């Protein structure tokens, strides 16, 4: 007797893993470019226009626009990378990424910082910037602060726990295991 149930559909698994990595790439791109955009913009603006052109509004706008570029760039990079990877290798990458507690903690810190600063930044700089720049730029700066908090905690010795990747055990197919009486 044969079952017509497909246990492992490589095409669907590859598509789900690609979607996971695109979302993860977008998140990491947002975090990294939100961290890099303010100092890069400040150096560029000071070198080209002088100190008079550095304002809170422009720094916040550069932060959220940099984060947006990171979302697009990170998603596109991971999509291209995942499309050219075979299903088995992509599945292994996803397992490693899923159990990477350091990356998960960095994402958590960045999310907490983003939400916190999206609320605090408008309260502090209400009259100095446009409201959309205050909220989105504050979220970008908060994400960067959260990411720096994660790296600071790791540098001071507070490392996240290492979780072993579970390996599936083969099913027990012996006759003895299937006919044993319950305890």
Image: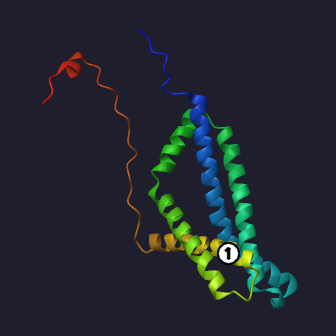
Name the element at disc 1: helix
Q: Residues within 10 Å of mark 1 (few under 14, many from 20)?
A: many
Instruction: Please tell me which residue lies in front, 6 or 35.
Output: 6
Q: In this view, does 69 lie to the left or right of 53?
A: left
Q: In this view, does 2 lie to the left or right of 44?
A: left
Q: Which residue is the extreme one toward the right?
A: 49
Q: Which quadrant holds the C terminus?
A: top left
Residue 86 seen in this snapshot: yes
- Taking 66 as reference, is 125 above or below it? below
- Residue at the spot 73% in from the left edge and 76% down from the top edge: 133
Q: In which quarter of the image is residue 37?
A: bottom right
Location of mark 1 (residue): 135
- Quarter residue 32 falls in: bottom right
Image location of residue 56, percent across then percent down: 73, 85
Query: Which residue in the rendered view is the most extreme toward the top?
Result: 1
Does residue 42 show up? no
Foreground pick, 164 / 26: 26
Q: In which quarter of the image is the N terminus?
A: top left
Q: In this view, does 160 lie above or below 10?
A: below
**Quadrant in the picture for residue 175:** top left
Judging from the image, the colouring scheme is rainbow
Q: Please report the residue visible at 45 percent of the width from the left and 50 percent of the height from the top.
A: 99
Number of callouts: 1
Residue 105, x across and y down, in percent: 47, 63
Residue occupying the far bottom of the picture: 52
Image position, residue 90 (x, y; %): 57, 39
Q: Which residue occupies 65% across, 56% down?
A: 26
- Against 54, residue 136 (above or below) is above
């Amino acid at each position: 007797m044969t079952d017509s149930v497909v246990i492992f559909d490589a095409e669907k698994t590859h598509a789900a893993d690609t979607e996971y990595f695109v979302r993860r790439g977008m998140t990491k791109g947002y975090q990294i470019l939100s961290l890099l955009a303010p100092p890069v913009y400040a150096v560029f603006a000071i070198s080209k226009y002088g100190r008079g052109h550095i304002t809170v509004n422009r720094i916040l706008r550069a932060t959220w626009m940099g984060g947006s570029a990171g979302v697009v760039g990170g998603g596109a990079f991971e999509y291209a990378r995942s499309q050219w990877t075979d299903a088995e290798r992509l599945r292994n990458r996803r397992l490693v990424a899923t159990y990477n507690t350091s990356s998960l903690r960095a994402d958590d810190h960045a999310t907490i910082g983003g939400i916190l600063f999206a609320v605090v930044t408008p309260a502090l700089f209400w009259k100095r910037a446009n409201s959309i720049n205050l909220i989105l730029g504050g979220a970008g700066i908060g994400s960067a602060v959260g990411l720096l908090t994660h790296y600071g905690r790791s540098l001071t010795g507070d490392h996240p726990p290492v979780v072993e990747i579970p390996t599936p055990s083969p099913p027990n197919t012996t006759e003895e295991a299937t006919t044993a009486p319950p305890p």
